[in-house]
Every structure is written in structure tokens, then in C-alpha cells.
Image (tube, rainbow, N blue to C red):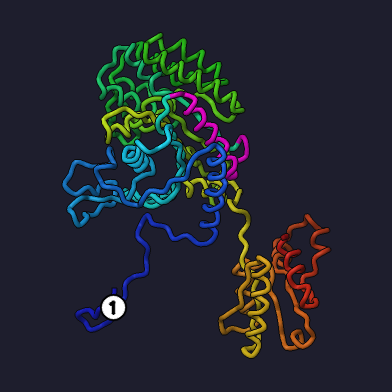
Amino acid sequence: MTDQPDTSGETFRPEARNPRGFADKRARDLRAERAILEAVSAVYERYGFEALDTGAFEYADALGKFLPDSDRPNEGVFALQDDDDQWMALRYDLTAPLARFAAQHWETLPKPFRRYAFGPVWRNEKPGPGRFREFIQCDADTVGSARPEADAEIIAMAVEGLEAAGLPRGAAVLKINNRKLLNGLLTAAGVETQGQKLAVLRAVDKLDRLGVEGVRLLLGEGRLDESGAFTKGAGLVGKAVDSVLDFVQAGSGGRSETLAKIADVIGGSAEGDAGLDELAKIDAALKSLGVADDQALFEPSIVRGLEYYTGAVFEAELLLSTTDDKGAKVSFGSIGGGGRYDDLVARFTGQSTPATGFSFGVSRLAAALRAAGREPGGAARGPVVVIAFDQAHMGEYFAVAGELRAAGISAEVYLGTSGMRPQMKYADRRLSPAAIMLGGDEIAAGTVTIKDLDLGRELASGIADNAAWKAERPGQQTIPRGELVAAVRKIIGG
């Protein structure tokens, strides 16, 4: 857009601002996301999953449940009209594009089709703290297998993937449930309408926030919150309410113990028994895959997705203590989830096609790791900076930078117009490990002076440990030019 004069004759200057919900990311954030994606992708490929990238846009009708009932489908998604009058929308997630791709290419795909994908997704929703309109997701899915072992493999892969991303064992846990269990329990209790079932699911989903008594009210007539607003309940009475509460509280102990408790509660309904059988097979497969109870457990209160999932559901919960920049405790809770969705591909084909998968938000996981003091991708590190003393020696400076780059070391020549002190400040602001100084005397003598900026930062921080490491590292040294690369490598630990 070119500058336009306004009616007063003054030049219009737009305010420099980014749209709400769209974040600018600098090197630290991009490095963290890249490190997570590389680590998790390596896990997925070891499990035999194929990488797939679909386009940013999908036809709006392919997005299924995200398509609103209006002429312009821009609620929840960012949509535009193609030149053939078809509505296109930026993808809301990575699962709907997979369902479209699988339906479109099913005849030529290996079955089951195992794919992983990562990339940006966009949601036209109100942004807020930690809630963005554009963010990176990473998914793995198996399409075409109804076996519970396919769910178990996804769970095991999620456990391993999150550990590879930087969450050590005990820092997160996969919580698993099966939608068929609660459906069977409600059927046995005489609940048959879909509306009432959804009301029960919504009540159960609030267990962590409202506690048992709050959920009891929502299962019954309803609940009056602190603001005075009344939420209508599911309308269950007596034993039905007690059965649901007994069910959602049956998740203590190991997986086998929890299965036994659930079996005592659900009362032998056909759908409930099917869910129990699937969880038992998932448990057996997880044991074979080496996934222990402390890494993945059965938790009957996990609901997820209401109408979206058809069987097993799972959610990754962060257990690490996390704090914000001011030291206040922050609760991240869920950092990913998934489950079985057997009806999504059928929207295109009319034929039931089983599918299961797991997804996590890469930016959210990076933020959680950072809040827990675990910087993804390691500590920030800038390039080695070659100080520019004299325009007449620019060729020498570029030769030094080129020598370092050829050795695989990130380097740059300072190309501003400031003096030496501001240049050193620039190098420090770039988090450079070292500054290279090459004045006329060094050039004439065939030497180079190296200032260890990493050591300077260590000393400035007042850290008292690794004294031996500090003693072996001179803050500044002048060495023969031929020893430059070796000396810089020693500083950067390479």
C-alpha cells in the first residue's frame, strides 16, 4: 500500500501493528519450534509413519463440523471465495485435510495409511492470553485400522515424542478413556436422547474446574455460579447421577486396577463392555510397547471433543511446575490430545473408515517447556562477530568470517557505522559467543585477538560453579591466525 495524502494534505502513516492473535516470532521461538519438530518427527518416522503436507487452504465444505450454517463461512475459519464461486478456508486443523486426502486417494494409498504432519493452522476466534489465531500443530494418525492396538501405538508414540521434545519421564502423562464406556453407562441408566448425553459429557468435562459437587449439580437440575448465572443441568436423577460420579472417579491406581473399578460401575451394557474390551487390548499393547502406568493411565473423566470422537480418547497433561516471567505459577494443563474418530472420512465416501490420531500444539509445548525452565533447542547462541575497525581492512574481516563459516561456525562482520564499544555491545546483544578483533597490528603480525563473550556473561552473572572451566579460558587472547578456528571451537564447545 502506498502512502496516501489525507484531506488535510498530510501524509498518511499507518500504525505499525500486527493483527491480534498473530504473533511475531524471533530466532528464540523459531529455534524452539524447530527443535521440537525435528525431535518428534524422528520418533514418528521410527514408528514407520509417512510425512504428509497438505495445502493451507481447503474447500470450506471439507471442514465438516467447522462449517457454519451461513452463506459466508467465515465463523471459526478464515474464508474467501475462489474465482469459481467455491468457498475456500485456511485449514482449522490437520485432521480434516487428512480425511479429505484419504478419501480422495484411498484407492492408491497403502492401508492402513500412517502419516504425520506439522504446520500452521488458523482459527477465526477471539484471541486472548495464550490463545492465537495462527499456531503450529503436529499430528500423527493411522487411517484404516479399527484395532485397539492402533490406538495404543499412537499413545506410545505420543509418550516417546513428548519425551524426545524435552519432557523427561514424569513431566507429563497420557490420560486415556473410551467414549463407549460412558455411553453404555448412560444407556443402562435410561438416557437415550443425544441432547441429554451431550449435557452429561459437558458436565463431566468440568470435573477439574468445578469438583465433584459442581458436576453433581450439572448432572441434575443445574448449577448457579458465583456470578448468579444459572446453567441448566442434564436432568439425571438418583442412581443415574451416582453411577456417573462413581464412573468418573474410578481412575485411581494402575491401568489394570482402573479397568476393574470401571467394570464394577458400568453394569454390563453391550457398548460399555465393548469399550472395556478395547481398553484391555490397549493396556496389553502398551505393556508390550514398554509404556508404564506412570506414563499412560486410564482416566474415566477425560471426555474430549464431545461429538467428534467415537471410541478411545486420550489427553497429554503437563505435570511440571511452571512459572511465568515474574515467577508466578502457571498451569498449562493439557498440552495435546487425540483419539479415535471413525466417522470423519465417511463424510466424503459414505463408508465408515476407522481412524485414530494424536495432536499437540508446538508453540504451546515450547511455551510450557520454557515456563518449566527447559529451553527447547538449548540456550540462545548468536554468531561470532568480527569487529570492523577500519574500512580499508574490510577484505580481511570478510576473509575471517568466511574462514569461520567454512568450518561450520556462524559468523558475521559488523556492518554498521559505530565505534568499537557499540560494536561490542552489539555482539553481546546478539548473544555472540566471541568477538574477533583484527586491527592493523594484528594484520601485520599475522595474529588475531579473540574476546570470549560467553565467559564474560558467566562472570557477570555471578555463577560460582565451574571454576576450573573459567580458569582454563582467558577472557581475551591473541593467537596466530592459523589457530583461529580451533580457538573459537573451544569457546563454543564444538
Return the residue at label 1.
Answer: 3
Q: Is residue 52 left or right of residue 419?
A: left
Q: Position of residue 124 (x, y in %)?
A: 31, 50
Count neighbours of disc 1 (C-alpha within 10 A) and say few if under 14, some if 14 to 19, many if 20 or more: few
Q: Is residue 289 left or right of residue 307?
A: right
Which residue sits at x=53%, y=26%? 297
Residue type beneath disc 1: Asp
On the question of residue 206 being in view, the answer is: no
On the question of residue 28 being in view, the answer is: yes
What is the quadrant of residue 207 in the picture?
Answer: top left
Q: Where 396 sits versus 113, above or below?
A: below
Which residue sits at x=62%, y=89%? 391
Q: Position of residue 247 (x, y in %)?
A: 43, 17
Q: Is residue 479 left or right of residue 230?
A: right
**Quadrant including the N terminus:** bottom left
Q: Is residue 92 magenta?
A: no
What is the quadrant of residue 254 in the picture?
Answer: top right
